[in-house]
Amino acid sequence: MENIQKVDLTKVKPYGDTLNDGMVQMSFTLPVPYGDEAKEAARQLAAKMGFDDPAVVYAKDLGVGYTYFIVYGKCTHTVDYTAIEVPKVDMEFMDREEVEQYIEENIKRNVVIVGACTGTDAHTVGIDAIMNMKGFDGNFGLERYKGIEAINMGSQVPNEELIAKAIETKADAILVSQVVTQKDVHIANLTQLVEMLEAEGLRDKVILVCGGPRISHELAQELGYDAGFGAGSYANHVATFVVKQIVERNLI
Amino acid sequence: MRLIETIKHNNYETISIIGLAKNAGKTVTLNYLIEEAFNFNLRIGITSTGRDGESTDLVTQTEKPPIFVTEGMYVATAKKALLLSKAKTEILETTGITTAMGEVIIVRVRQGGYIQIAGPVSGTDMKYVAGRLKHYGAETVFIDGAIDRKAVSSPVITDACIIATGAVLSRDIKKVLEKTAHTVECYTLKEVDAPVKEIFEKTDKTCILKEDGSIIVPNIKTNIMGGKKINTLIDEETTHVFVKGAITSSFLKDLKDNKYLRGIKLIIEDGTKIFTDINVWNELKRKGLKVETMNRINVLAVTLNPISPAGYFFDSDTLKDRMEKILPGIKILDVVSGGE
């Protein structure tokens, strides 16, 4: 038997049928009518993207002069996987019982957490996974935690209303979820919340956490949040961060 | 006078660089000032409310300008950002302020090189850190804003500010001019007369002042949603309405149909508290509302980036000329095409 080729993590490229063949499948739509010219346009565009041997394997007329394509091409670039460093919330996460016990021993009162999907975003999957009783993927949400009063305001909540609610309920932490937005509007939305909290003199008094598939802990720094939780985060991660911060920042 | 000379001449201790959008050219402006400070022997400290000096932008994945610091400069940056830096530094203090990138550390540059900066995220912490940089010997501290965050330019935190704007705001040059002018207008509103200022400094709460000097403090938890209540309290004897905190579009809309609008002055803390949409703001002004401020913000310059990462650009001279026309008396600098 032939020797199995080893993966070189310093030069990683896409895998199709064989290691390092660089094969990529992409799909896109062009605003041109279906036909041979359209396919050639898609092929040329993929070539301009830097793909070797681009091939249009599927094209469909979308009507109204638009065509949808699936194109294969070979990626010529590599990344050094070993040099990648992604900052994450760096702490040992407690589970639900440990968080509950921590609150009882160290905070000795209910922790109030207000959460919402702000701005134009109507996708509540993220905030629901963290806050709702039933939770997500076998991890109960914050509503289930003893010692945490979780208020989920739902979707498309304006920043003003979220802040007003936080003031009304004397919230310890504000959670904001942004799942699907266009043209980076989630960024402007997230920074506006920080700015309004600063204007209201509340920024130091609350723990501000953002989350969503396009949010990283590193981005949270840039946005002015205390932490950012990306995909694969559960309620106990957020809860651990919040309760520890309450104690660390002396917000008891 | 060159911008750096103005800064030196007036002994400004803390200066914020804020952007009206991402990619408006804040870091290019900061780099320009670092170079000028070096040439004019001004010992500076730098920090950022976001992240600076990393090679690719976290949001747009576009290339970001690196930051080169020289020997003798002071920098406040987070631990993880410092570990990614090439400059050799001496640690002066660990502040205990935590950020997403680790604890904020204050260093002196021993050997020049590229550096990554991630400073405190909140205004209060930023004020403290700027104070520490001065304590160690920085004559002027520059604070680079993040994305479109402006809170750091409040006079409570910094003495003066530089506003970075550019093509990235809109494909329509008129919109770029309009948005920039709106921010400068909000920042440089007329300051309220001293006796009235004193009254509001004392109450330190959203309140309504009447002709006879009496004060009504409305029973609201926040003015963000309290516009309706305030609206009902304004009458013919009202002279000033002081709003502590954020002024939002919905707040102004609540006042829109008040028949005493012409007779009152709305007093805000400072320009960073205004979050209204330009149209709502202009409508209220057309209806006769006068807005004054407790603290005017010192706008030292407006810097321009005529290029947008979205792939379009304006002619540098045209943008500069039109900006100068719309903002008379304010220094306009195109830092991308060459500075002063």
Image (spheres, coloured by chain):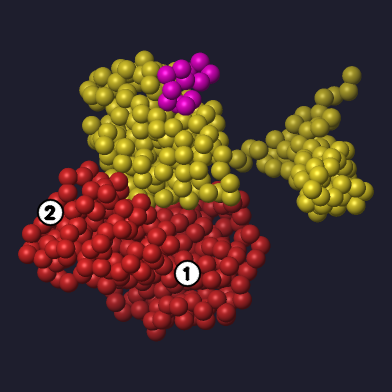
Q: Secondary structure at mark 1?
A: helix
Residue at the spot x=32%, y=71% of the render? B188
Q: The disc labelled 2 sits on which kind of residue?
A: Ile
Number of numbered discs on residues: 2
Depth check: B16 or B141 in front?
B16
Magenta part of the chain: A128-139
Q: Which tint was used for chain A?
A: yellow
Which is more foreground, mark 2 or mark 1? 2
User: Which numbered circle lies on residue B216?
Assistant: 2
Identify the residue under disc 1: B178
Q: Disc 2, disc 1: CB below 8 Å?
A: no
Q: Is residue A86 visible?
A: no
Q: Which tint was used for chain B?
A: red
User: Which numbered circle lies on residue B228?
Assistant: none
Label 1: how many Cα within 10 Å (few below 14, some 14–19, many 20+): some
Real-space CA distance between mark 2 and mark 1, rounded to the nearest whole angstrom: 36 Å
For disc 2, the chain is B
Depth check: A70 or A31 in front?
A31
Label 2: how many Cα within 10 Å (few below 14, some 14–19, many 20+): some
Figure quadrant of residue B236: bottom left
Residue at the spot x=31%, y=79% of the render? B9
Q: Is residue A137 left or right of residue A92?
A: right
Image quadrant holding the C terminus of chain A, namely: top left
Q: The disc labelled 1 sits on which kind of residue?
A: Glu
Q: Is residue A48 left or right of residue B193?
A: right
Q: Earlier in the sequence, mark 2 or mark 1?
A: 1
Depth check: A234 or A182 in front?
A182
Q: Secondary structure at mark 2?
A: strand
Image quadrant holding the N terminus of chain A, namely: top right
Give above or below for B73 relative to A214: below
Residue at the spot x=77%, y=29% of the render? A6
